[in-house]
Image (cartoon, rainbow, N blue to C red):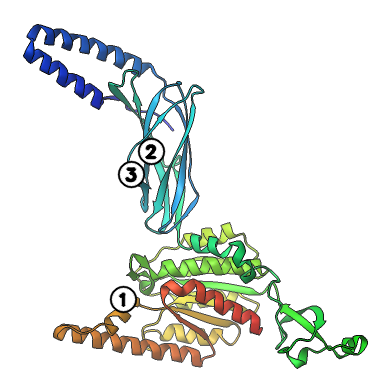
């Protein structure tokens, strides 16, 4: 960072002295003139000393990612003249706010090294940064401030990504919830194919009789069953619609925000269970494609964070054509989207039906909560009646479209956006438990 543009500013202490000198001039012009002259000399000395103070060495550390609506900590290290008082504030990029949004004051101790911190809040999804740092050095007598700006070029900005789902991911990783996601934690009883043998154990009431190992039973004299666990290294493909329907917001969050949160947590859970995870983002074009693999969560999170919501219709033909070429193994294809009616959504319905012949599609349909509220609210006046009737008709058409999707052998989770994380995890666990892949 560089420090251009220097300027001096008065402090409240200086303003108070000026007022006192002015009052003295009214009471006694000669005494007031002497006081003003003395103050001028003091100011010159203060300014000279302040201008000679070297700019403190500053280092800033920012969180690489913060949750949408969540907070992260920006840490600042200052090294300079012992006893120097420094006020600092930095410029957040779009979608980020400082909390509180006011300068911080730090006095350097005898070591000349101090640290300070401030919180930032993620207001809008996307890539952002922390930019220019503004310093104000206090003079030795506290009369002047010397403004110095550590201007950050575009290359020197500290990047920060605002991403939905990070808090949900942290909650999912809490020790008390590990049983929901740890590899091998679910020892699943064998109901059909797609399982791996885990161990032998004694029969307990409720076990499937088909799991009885008769040879082991004969040897031990007790009924012994085979226990299985879900097959590992299966494919999970996350497809996120970044088109018009997913940009609709309710209570400050787009449906796409909730879909991204669910996708992030689901990806982490699948990775922990040994499955391979892929991502496809689609709007009017395919924005990103990450083929299924044992990717790091950082890599998956980066791909999800690259999404750009657009008020366009998603290009499902191109998206499913890409999946047809690249997905060679049977996969669980989770599509986060919504539907309007059978006619409007016919392209999606057709491609889901084709995909169901080879893969296991799961549609996580994100409800329009605002429309549901209109349909359920008491009608006030003729306009209110029209709005409620129209909303109910649209919801009925949506239900017809979802029923058509189910008839094609596609799994459907019809969820409120805020419940997408929990419902996606539940459906994934059900697929693994039942061995549907």
Which residue corresponds to the image point at 42% horizontal and 59% vertical from the top-left? 68
Which mark, residue 132?
2
Residue 396 in the image: state x and y as whole percent. 34, 90
Is residue 407 among what the camera can see? yes
Is 371 drawn above or below residue 300 in the view shown?
below
Which residue corresponds to the image point at 28% horizontal and 84% vertical from the top-left? 375
Residue 180 in the image: state x and y as whole percent. 61, 71
- Find disc 3 in the rendering and name its residue: 101
Q: In which quarter of the image is the C terminus?
A: bottom right
Which residue corresponds to the image point at 59% horizontal and 75% vertical from the top-left? 325
Q: What element carries label 2?
A: strand
Mark closer to the observer (2, 1): 1
Which of the marked residues, 3 or 1, is nearer the chain's N terminus?
A: 3
Residue 260 in the image: state x and y as whole percent. 47, 67
Depth check, front residue: 254 or 18: 18
Is 212 drawn above or below residue 3 in the view shown?
below
Q: In which quarter of the image is the N terminus?
A: top left
Depth check, front residue: 218 or 146: 218
How many residues crowd around disc 3 within 10 Å: few (fewer than 14), some, or many (20 or more)?
A: some
Residue 95 figure quarter:
bottom left
């Amino acid at each position: 960072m560089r420090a251009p543009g220097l300027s001096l500013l008065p402090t409240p202490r200086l303003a108070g002295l000026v007022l006192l000198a002015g009052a003295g001039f009214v009471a006694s012009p000669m005494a007031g003139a002497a006081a003003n002259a003395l103050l001028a000399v003091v100011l010159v000395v203060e300014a000279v000393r302040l201008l000679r103070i070297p700019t403190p060495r500053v280092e800033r550390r920012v969180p690489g990612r913060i949750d949408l609506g969540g907070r992260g900590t920006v840490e600042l290290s200052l090294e300079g003249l012992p006893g120097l008082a420094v006020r600092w504030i930095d410029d957040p990029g779009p979608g980020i706010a400082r909390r509180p949004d006011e300068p911080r004051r730090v006095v350097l101790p005898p070591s000349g090294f101090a640290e300070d911190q401030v919180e930032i809040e993620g207001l809008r999804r996307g890539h952002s940064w922390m930019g220019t740092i503004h310093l104000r050095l206090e003079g030795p007598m506290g009369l002047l401030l010397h403004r110095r700006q550590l201007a950050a070029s575009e290359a020197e900005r500290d990047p920060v990504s605002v991403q939905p789902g990070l808090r949900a991911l942290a909650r999912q990783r809490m020790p008390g919830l590990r049983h929901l996601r740890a590899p091998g934690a679910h020892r699943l009883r064998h109901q059909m194919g797609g399982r791996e043998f885990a161990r032998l154990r004694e029969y307990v009431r409720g076990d499937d009789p088909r799991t009885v190992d008769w040879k082991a039973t004969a040897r031990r004299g007790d009924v012994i069953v085979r226990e299985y666990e879900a097959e590992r290294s299966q494919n999970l493909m996350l497809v996120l619609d970044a088109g018009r329907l997913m940009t609709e917001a309710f209570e400050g969050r787009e449906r796409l925000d909730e879909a991204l949160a669910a996708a992030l947590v689901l990806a982490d859970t699948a990775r922990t269970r040994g499955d391979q995870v892929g991502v496809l983002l689609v709007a009017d074009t395919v924005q990103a494609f990450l083929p299924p693999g044992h990717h790091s969560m950082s890599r998956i999170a980066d791909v999800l964070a690259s999404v750009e919501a657009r008020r366009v219709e998603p290009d499902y033909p191109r998206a499913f054509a890409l999946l047809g070429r690249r997905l060679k193994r049977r996969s669980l294809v989770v599509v986060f989207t919504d539907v309007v009616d059978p006619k409007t959504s016919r392209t999606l319905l057709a491609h889901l039906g084709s995909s169901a012949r080879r893969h296991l599609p799961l549609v996580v349909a994100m409800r329009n909560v605002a429309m549901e509220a209109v349909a359920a609210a008491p009608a006030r006046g003729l306009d209110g009646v029209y709005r409620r009737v129209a909303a109910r008709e649209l919801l009925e058409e949506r239900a017809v479209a979802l029923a058509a999707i189910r008839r094609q052998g596609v799994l459907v989770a019809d969820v409120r956006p805020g419940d997408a994380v929990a419902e996606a995890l539940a459906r994934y666990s059900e697929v693994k438990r039942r061995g549907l892949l």
